[in-house]
Image: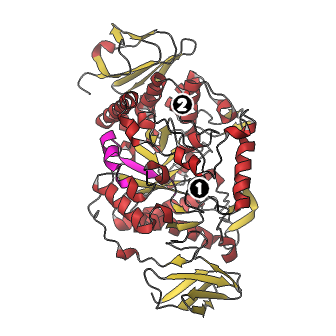
Amino acid sequence: MEHMEVWVPQARRVELACSDRLLRMTATESGWWLVEAPFIEHGVDYAFYIDGEGPFPDPRSCWQPAGVHGPSRWLNHEKFSWSDSCWRPPSLKTAVIYELHIGTFSESGTFEGAIDHLDQLIDLGITHVELMPVAEFSGSRGWGYDGVNLYAPHHAYGGPDGLKRLVDACHRRGLAVLLDVVYNHFGPEGNYLSRFGPYFTERYMTPWGDAVNLDGAHSHEVRRFFVDNALMWLRDYHFDGLRIDAVHAFLDISAIHFLEQLADEVGHLAGETGRHLVLIAESDLNDPRIVRSKGAGGYGIDAQWNEDFHHTLHTVLTGENNGYYRDFGTLADLAKVLTRVFKIDGIYSIHRNRVHGRPAGELPGSCFVGCLQNHDQIGNRGLGERTSHLLSWDLLKIGAALVMTSPFVPMIFQGEEWAASSPFLYFTDHQDQELAAAVKQGRREEFASFGQQDDQIPDPQAEKTFNRSKIDWAERNKQLHSEMFNWYRDLIALRRTMPALHEGRMEDVSVCFDESARWLTMTRKNMIVACNFSDSPRKITCCNTAEMEFALASQEGITAVDDELHLPPESVVILVCTGDI
């Protein structure tokens, strides 16, 4: 390379350290510092000194082989040979997304280890793999939401080349790949960004500390930092899209919201490369503007997680009603979500103690991602219980059927497809012992209000907590787990072969239910899904069943007599018009 540059707008002196060299850099009016560095090439380590303090890794470091406190290593992306030049991802509206955590998805916990199980995802019928965050974080194990080197794939997972090999292997098998990125906060250990510039602001706060500076002085460079990061993952690592963590924590009063800028620039990259690129937001706002087009006054994000669908389905199945689940729990709530996207859509929220959200309006269901489980809803429980730990297997099958036949884009979490027995616990590997102790104590205090004792909450820092969270692939072949896997595989196959399930037309969805008898039917074009949530058999009247046939049934003993369905306890059946299977 000809020169090295770094943005440090408020420094008096900046130096580049490389091998035995310490070179004084030259400031520009824009706050960038430059120095000629022809000796910096692929594989060379370097760092920066700022006003005599350091060394600090590069904020835009693409390679941190020694972790968050070590030097940066220069990466030449052109060194990698890709084999996916003809790859074109399937449409998001036809997707079945599989969320996974690299560290617990395989025994080795690496990008290479994940490759070994891709064929099993193909067998299941998955179209899109979604990786939980992989940017460099402290230690060797963690969820990834405490990342500090946002441009560098985690060294313990296999670094830059390992990640590229994984994406390339997915594309060879016909799998699209999405990456979870975190732009609303940084981890507490190894975060040197404040030494470089005003990346944070004290004007706003998030649950994780100071908010990122998206609308204050110098915010144009901070926004550029995040947008360039997104473009890097899509361009240099060939990701097909990004899932953006907790966009409700973006505090931005700019005329052009950060999300709108991000969507615009990703759209430009898609046009330049000829590749279809997607953005999916996690949002607690229930605000349809996030996924409305720019022309309709929105931000232009392709889709967002539908938390109301998860919460409603979870509470109906489990009966839980604490915390944010207080706003949900009835079949009426589930019917509303299935037909109108949000339950809290400009009405009073008991949990928030205020009016929240707004109606989704004309938006199709394909703008929303629905699930029964995800990393948050499992791992943020004190004991990391999956839904399979909370429900009978018959109720699990009902939940899976509603996810796969809903008008939303379905997503499942690793191991869900065979009702994995392993929990997904919260785990960390902070090297700062005071921080590690604080995280452990905070975790215990958080769940004390739920009646769980200190010794019940696994220590996040303990390696055994991490190891317990690894999924056991051999378990998939055991009898009951194999039965659940086959149920998921059949549901996915049905979804993929019925075009009506991809359309997401909310106007084509109708729901009938009986709250006291605990049954519900959802009708979509050419299809009826009938669910009995109760522990007693039910008879449900459904029109036109004589013109339909069973596509899938969760139990034996489900029958249709004229226009009446007879359902055993905790059962579900899917009927389709003859010829549509």
Q: Is residue 128 magenta?
A: yes
Q: CA distance from mark 1 to mark 2?
A: 25 Å
- CB under 8 Å between callouts 1 and 2? no
Residue 430 magenta: no
Magenta stretch: give its range: 115-133
Q: What residue is at 50 percent from the left and 35 percent from the top?
A: 372
Q: Nearer the viewer, residue 33 or 145?
A: 145
Q: From this viewpoint, is residue 227 visible?
A: yes
Q: Secondary structure at mark 1?
A: loop
Q: Please state the horizontal and vertical placement of residue 100, each as a whole percent of the image.
A: 46, 48
Residue at 29% from the left image edge and 52% from the top image edge? 173
Quadrant the N terminus occupies: bottom left
Q: Amino acid at mark 1?
A: Tyr
Sequence-first tag of 1 and 2: 1
Q: Position of residue 138 (x, y in %)?
A: 60, 63
Mark number, residue 145: 1
397 to 76, vertically: above or below: above
Q: x and y percent of residue 401 in the render?
A: 42, 28
Query: Which mark is on residue 389?
Result: 2
Q: Residues within 10 Å of mark 1 (few under 14, many from 20)?
A: many
Asked whether 496 or 83 is in front, the reply is 83
Residue 489 image offset from top left, x and y in percent? 34, 34
Q: Residue 564: which quarter of the image?
A: top left
Neighbor class of circle 2 (other Cα within 10 Å; few <14, some 14-19, many 20+) is: some
